[in-house]
């Protein structure tokens, strides 16, 4: 079963959730009401051999990526990370457990979301870290969902896409927490929708289009590419960019690159000259 099908299976079973669930499965974070406070919560796994090369990745960077990709999900809602939990599956022969947890602890503190609990199990491998992160929504804007894009909005990117794995960016990226909060403070409700790019610009932009019931059209020449990315075609599908895709009722946003627009319809395409290329499945569907 592919990840997309499994997620749909989960969403289908989330149709009738209690009123304490403000935003259920299907966005970068869930939003839940706990004692009257709205809390962001998300979880993500980091697995050896899949998300990092087990033999060659320094322990510090494994720990950093495990925390940072969760922090990036909080950034995608324009929230503030506050607390972290980490459950680790350690191969029986693994000898760096103390260092690994020291670094998880340190990076959680670095991103402002201290480690408050976790679990350890010994397994046959590979090394795997499951991180749960909690946060608070933006005080003025509230959580920025994937579903708010409207025809007429412009589409922006916070940085280049492509060659994340080859360049090492996937281990050392900077989650866009401060940027997201600044945009939310400046634009308030004109900031319509956001997602952090984990699986590829094509597939992730399509997720926003689908959640919002709109079509996203991007211009090939406008898509910023990381050094080492041959063309926009690789850039839209490489994944692990951890940049923000932003849909906003604004002509320009300081620090972001405008790459396209939101129109009526459905799907996600790139325009290159007279050509219109469907990129809605361009990226990682972790099958
Ligand atoms: Mg995400």
Image (cartoon, rainbow, N blue to C red):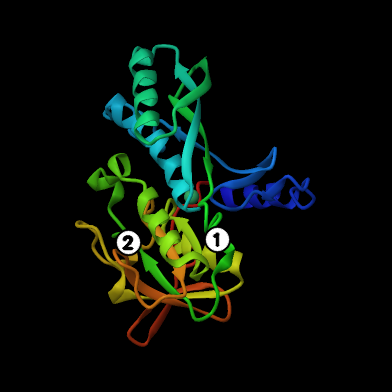
The residue at 46%/28% (across/down) is 129
Check disc 1: other Cα within 10 Å, few if <14, some if 14-19, many if 20+.
many
Q: Does residue 143 appear left or right of residue 244 in this picture? A: right
The residue at 61%/71% (across/down) is 213
Residue 199: x, y in percent?
44, 52
Where disc 1 sits, the SS reads helix
Instruction: Compute the Cα span from label 1 to label 2.
Output: 21 Å
Q: Is residue 42 above or below residue 143?
A: above
Residue position marked by numbered label 2 in the rendering? 235
Tag shown at residue 146: 1
Residue 240 visible in the current orientation: no
Residue 12 visible in the current orientation: yes
State if disc 2 and disc 1 touch (CB < 8 Å).
Answer: no
Q: Does residue 8 appear left or right of residue 235 in this picture? A: right
Residue 149: x, y in percent?
54, 70
Q: Does residue 221 appear left or right of residue 156 in this picture? A: left
Observer-side mark, 1 or 2, equals: 1
Q: Is residue 223 above or below residue 146?
A: below
The residue at 41%/57% (across/down) is 200
The residue at 34%/28% (across/down) is 54
Q: Is residue 90 above or below residue 151?
A: above
Q: Is residue 161 above or below residue 249?
A: above
Q: Quadrant of residue 38?
A: top right
Q: Nearer the viewer, residue 252 or 15?
A: 252
Residue 171: x, y in percent?
31, 39
Can you tell me whether the CB of the residue at mark 2 lies under 8 Å from the nearest atom of ligand 1?
A: no
Q: Does residue 33 appear left or right of residue 59 in this picture? A: right
Where disc 2 sits, the SS reads helix
């Amino acid at each position: 079963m592919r990840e997309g099908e499994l997620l749909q299976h989960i969403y289908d079973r989330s149709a009738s959730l209690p009123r304490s669930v403000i935003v259920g499965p299907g966005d970068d974070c869930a939003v839940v009401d706990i004692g009257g406070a709205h809390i962001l919560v998300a979880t993500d796994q980091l697995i050896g051999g899949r998300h990092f090369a087990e033999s060659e990745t320094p322990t510090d960077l494994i720990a950093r990526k495990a925390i940072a990709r969760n922090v990036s999900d909080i950034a995608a809602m324009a929230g503030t990370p506050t607390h972290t939990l980490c459950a680790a599956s350690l191969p029986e022969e693994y000898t760096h457990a103390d260092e690994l947890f020291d670094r998880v602890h340190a990076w959680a503190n670095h991103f402002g979301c201290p480690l408050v609990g976790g679990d350890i199990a010994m397994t046959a491998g590979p090394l795997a870290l499951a991180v749960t992160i909690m946060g608070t929504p933006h005080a003025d804007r509230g959580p920025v969902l994937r579903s708010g894009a409207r025809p007429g909005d412009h589409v922006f990117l916070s940085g280049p896409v492509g060659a994340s794995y080859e360049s090492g960016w996937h281990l050392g990226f900077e989650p866009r927490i401060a940027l997201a909060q600044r945009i939310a403070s400046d634009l308030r409700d004109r900031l319509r929708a956001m997602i952090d790019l984990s699986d590829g610009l094509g597939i992730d932009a399509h997720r926003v289009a689908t959640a919002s019931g709109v079509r996203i059209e991007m211009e090939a020449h406008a898509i910023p590419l990381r050094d080492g990315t041959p063309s926009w075609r690789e850039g839209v599908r490489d994944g692990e960019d951890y940049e923000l895709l932003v849909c906003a009722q604004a002509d320009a946003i300081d620090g972001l690159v405008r790459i396209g627009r939101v129109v009526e319809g459905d799907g996600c395409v790139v325009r290159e000259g007279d050509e219109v290329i469907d990129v809605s499945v361009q990226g990682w569907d972790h099958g």
